[in-house]
Image: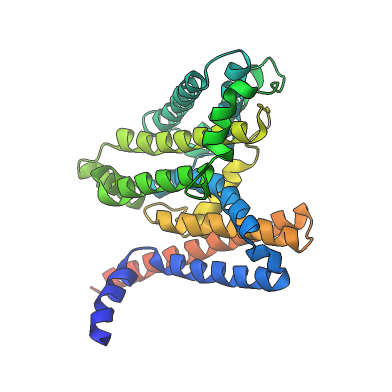
Amino acid sequence: MGTALEKPMKRLLAIRGIGQVLTVTVGLILLCIVFGIMNPVFFSSRNVANLLRQIAPILLIGIGQSYVLITGNIDLSIGSVVGMSTMISATMMTKGALPWVAVLVTILSCLGLGLANGLLVSFAKLPPFIATLGTMTIARGIAQIANNNYNTDSIGEAAQGFRDFFYYGKTFGLYNTIWIAIVLWLIFNFILTRTRSGRHIYAIGSNVEAARLSGVNIVSTTTKAYLVSAFVSCVVGLITTATSGMGTMDAGNSYELYAVAASVIGGVSTLGGQGLLFGTVIGASIWGVLQNGLQFAGAPVAIRNIVIGIIVVVSVLLDVIVRSGKVGKKKHSSTLV
C-alpha cells in the first residue's frame, strides 16, 4: 500500500514550485481555524458565500499577474484597466447602449491596452516596470475622460440582467461571480499547463535567450501573457460595475498590488519561470481570509494592509533566497567538474 502511494507523492513533489503551494495551503487552513475559533460566524454559510465572492476578483487579477510574472515581467496597469473597464461599460450603458454591446466594446478596449503592454515590453524592449507604469496612467486617464471626469449615474433597470450575470445571480447555489472565476481559472490553467503556449511562457521566464534559440517567439508569447492579464482585469471591471450599478473613476485602485499578493503568496516567482495557478487560488484565498477574518476581529483597515504587505514582502524574500541558493549550488557544482 505504501509503495502504491509513494509514486503519486513523488510525482506531486517533483512539480516545480509545489513546495511553497503546499506550505501556503497549510497556512490557509490554519488561518481559517484560528479565525473560526475567534468568531464562529466566520464559518457561517452566509459569510463563506460572501468570502468566496470577495476572493473571486482577486483570483482573476492574480491569474493575469501570474501569467506575466512567470514570463519574468510584471503588469502595473491591472488596477487601472479594472477602472477603465468599469467606466467604459457603465458610461455606455447609461448612454443607452445594450449591455452586451457595452461588454464587447469594453473587452476590445482593454485587450488593446494589453496588446500595447506586450509590444512595448517584448518588441520595443522597454523595461516592464516603465512600460506598464505608463499604460497604467493612460488607462486611468481613459477611465477619467470616459464620462467627462465624473462618476456615472446608475446603469438602470435595463442592465439588471448584466448585474445578475456578473454579480447577483446564482447558479447551482453559487454566486455567478464565483462561477466566472472557476471557469476562467480552468481555461487559463489548461492553457498554462497543457499547451505549447504555456510551455513557452515558462521557457521565457526561465531563460529568455535559451527560449529564443529554441525557436520560441518571444514577442508573441509575452504579448499573450499581457493579453490574458488585460482580459481578466476587464472581467473584474465588469464585475465591479455590476456590483455597484455605476461606474467610479477610482475603481481598481491598488488592485495591481492585490494581484501581486495573490501570485507571490501562492508561490509564483517574481524572477520568472516558476509558479502554479493552483497556488494563485491559495494566495487569493489567504488575502480574502485575512481581510475577512481581521475585519471580524475588529482590526482597522491600516492593520489589515500592514499584515498583507508584510506577508507579500516575506514571500518574495523567501523566493529570492531559495532561487539564489539554487543558482549558487549550480555554480559550485560546475566548478568542481
Please determine whether, in this image, residue 326 is positioned above or below residue 94: below
The C terminus: image quadrant: bottom left
- Extreme residue in the left direction: 214
Q: Is residue 91 visible?
A: yes
For the point 59% across and 37% down, the residue is 79
Q: How many marks?
A: 0
Residue 270: percent from the left, percent from the top? 47, 53
Q: Is residue 241 left or right of residue 101?
A: right
From the top left corner, tell me how far across and down residue 9 is, in percent: 31, 75
Q: Position of residue 12 (x, y in %)?
A: 32, 69
Measured as percent of width and height from the top left, residue 141 is found at 62, 22
Quarter of the image where one finds residue 104: top left
Can residue 127 be seen in this snapshot? no
Q: Residue at x 24, y 45 (%)?
A: 196
**Residue displayed at 65% across by 33% down:** 251
Q: Quadrant of the N terminus?
A: bottom left
Q: Quadrant of residue 30?
A: bottom right
Q: Residue furthest bottom?
A: 2
- Image quadrant assignment for residue 73: top left
In terms of depth relative to the viewer, which is nearer, 141 or 284?
284
**Horizontal arrangement in the rendering, residue 117 relative to residue 292 (left or right):** left
Q: Residue 158 versus residue 240: which sits nearer the camera?
A: 158
Is 277 placed left or right of 200 in the picture?
right
Between 40 and 119, the one lying in front of the other is 40
Task: Tell me the colour scheme of the image.
Answer: rainbow
